[in-house]
Amino acid sequence: MTLFRQIGAVVLMNFKSLPHRVGTSIVIVIGIAGVVAVLVSVLAMSTGMLETMEHSGRDDRAIVMRNGSASEGGSALSRDAARLVQDAAGVKRDSAGKPIASAEAVRLANVVRKDGTEVSVTVRGTGPQLAALRPEVKIIQGRMFRPAVTEMIVGKAANAEFKGMNIGDQIRTRGANWTIVGVFTSDGDSHESGLMADAETLIAADQRGGFQSVTVLLESTAAFQKFKDSITSNPALAVDVSREREYYRRQSETLGKVIYIIAYVVGGIMAIGAIFSALNTMYSAVSARLREIATLRAIGFGATAMVMSVLAEALLLALIGGTIGAAIAWLFFNGHQVSTSAGGNAAGHLIFELSVSPALIATGIIWACTIGLIGGLLPAVRAARLPVATALRAI
Amino acid sequence: MKYFGLIWAGLWRKRARTFFTMASVVVAFLLFGLLQGINQGFNTVVTNLNVDRLYVSAKTNMTDGLPIAYAARIRNVPGVKALSHWTYFGGYYQNAKNAIPAFATDARQLFKVYHELTIKPEYLDAMERTRTGAIVSQQLAQQYGWKIGDRVPLGTSIWTTKQGSSTWMFDIVGTFDVSAYNQGFPAFYLNQEYFTENAAFGGSVVHYYLVGISDPHQATQISKQIDALFENSTNETRTQTESALAQQQLKALGDINFIVNAIVGAVLFTLMFLTANTMMQSVSERTPELAVLKTLGFSDGKVLTLVLIEALALCVFAAAIGLALATFAFNSGALKAVFGGFRMPLIVMGMGAGVALLLALISGLPPAWRARQLNIVDALAGR
């Protein structure tokens, strides 16, 4: 019990004297804040991208593409194949008995970002069952496109990111002049980065090939196997079936992993630097408290109490630094919109928001505490080992 | 030079502190070297590009492709010296993770357009004789242990063969040196005729026409002429110079570049703060010693210089180690897997030296100024 009381007393005393060492203490705080801010913001990028992509898929939907295709961009399905897929077992049907599915034509269109760079975005031609298949697609401005007329609707993110994407604007692409008639949201998924139009109209205007994929709504999540079996046992079809969520996850896997590695390599190297500066700070904190520590030891306080007081100080400063770092990342980057063509979405440009999730903040704080503890350990041992007599005389 | 001992002693007055400060500066410059090296590496690739080559792709998007029949019409444009083409094959070896930059092409013409790539003429002859032939870069051959005469299966995520398979067989007939380019450069070439004949669908498509022109000054004019040929057709074209194309691809990376720069900024800011703080601490601890120096007759200016040189020595030495480590990381090939065969650009070294000087000045000047302003009597009295 006395040990705990000793530790409590010394730690408290130490914290009270902290304001006198602001100059050196701030070094550890800023060092750690830098590490955590960088780590959390870069991780927020990969988290944001994965969230956007995973959001695009649902477990009770399946996507069918030509066999061997890694993405819709490299796939092609004939009209017959598309019909066969929609009629397969396990597909949910509406009240009229029609399968809830959409044979989609996926094209790219060149658009100009507000900063003047030209990029390609996805134009998704969808079937008449769009509303039943993708209930998350909601028009927030204007109206839905009509079939057989060259009209498009634009995703909310694309509307904000690119020039000439407002209602009434015309886009000349894919062999026609398309009028934007509406803006849609789809729960912040990857479709919001692109445009949608009627599949048949798009195919007719474009005159280059047909469908790329068929997306179907399943009777239930469990009906996937039934659907898959029905497709794979059909000798007329040479296609691959995936759950929609898995398909979108695969699309973002590579880039997500690269960003992840960058975050940990850069964060790791920075952390090593921060450990050195933490060591610096804590060593000078110990030398500033030399007289105090020696006196305490002389009147009977144990070595453990000294170690704990130094570690507690390091931890407190690390916590402050970590919190500041996470706060900086959150303030500057949470919800910050990034757009890239770096392969996140195999078909086109992807716009997503950085997401500083609570889990990321926790990761950041854990890193901060680890750095603080490692940086505090050696100085703490020094404080404990201080020969009392020499220390008292040294002043 | 006679003050070297004095500066050295000042530097190592507190060994641990100097060592730790130095270590964190080393780490910061290691990061600086790595990130800027990669950044500049991309830019160097762009500026090293050739000006006498044009790329023709579908105006809508490269992936839409152009009819192979355009070749004859493009070749007739005045000023066009050589013409070849690329069709993206989307290849992989053994599993989808080992992506192979494979393209269908007209190999003989290709090496005329890419005149800086060297290949033995007999390999080109063999390529023409062997329908299923393939020419690969030496680097790629080495990576997968392929030798001339080997039969290699290549998977593709786009093209099915007439037999319904997504694996194609090729006979390696020759190699070429591609070390001047980075890893993404097309390094596996197959015969366009074989590709067109064997693909179940869409085999007569070309993704890029590569146009070699005789006079780089005419690049803009020739580009316009080519695009005018196909205006208002189903397949409109867009002709770009090599650097315009590369810049466009680089820009498409979008905001990722900005994030890299933000990290470098954050690292350097943190570091400047840390070093400045250490220097300040070290000088304030030495106040009485500096006062003694002044009593002995050291001028104000000399004391300022001494402190400043100390900061300079610390920063420059540590920065040099950090940059050397970064160079080592580039050369050792640890980064090759992710970023390709970059070399540490010299300019990054120059930038690093500049930043180190700046860092030394910013962190050294305030304490040096304080040392200069010291009043002997007050300092000795500990006021």
Image (spheres, coloured by chain):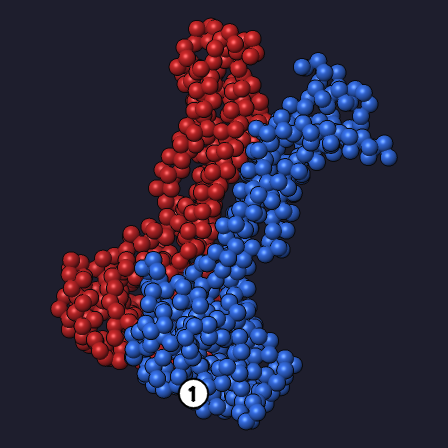
Identified at 67% across, 14% down, the residue is: A395
Q: Position of residue A276 (x, y in %)?
A: 58, 35
Residue B61 visible, this angle:
no
Q: Quadrant of the C terminus of chain B?
A: top right
Q: Colour of chain B?
A: red
Looking at the picture, tell me which residue is in the foreground, A241 or A329: A329
Question: Chain letter for blue?
Answer: A
| Total marks in image | 1
Q: Is residue B293 above or below residue A368?
A: above
For the residue marked with disc 1, what is the amino acid?
Ser
Q: Position of residue A119 (x, y in %)?
A: 35, 65
Looking at the picture, tell me which residue is in the foreground, A31 or B235: A31
The answer to which image quadrant residue A141 occupies is bottom left
In the displayed structure image, the side of residue A210 where residue A13 appears, left or right: right
The answer to which image quadrant residue A308 occupies is top right
In the displayed structure image, the side of residue B75 where residue B312 appears, left or right: right
Give the chain of mark 1.
A
Residue furthest right as drawn: A1
Q: Position of residue B272 (x, y in %)?
A: 47, 34
Q: Quadrant of the N terminus of chain B?
A: top left
Identified at 42% across, 78% down, the residue is: A143
Q: Which residue is mark 1?
A: A78
Residue B382 visible, this angle:
yes
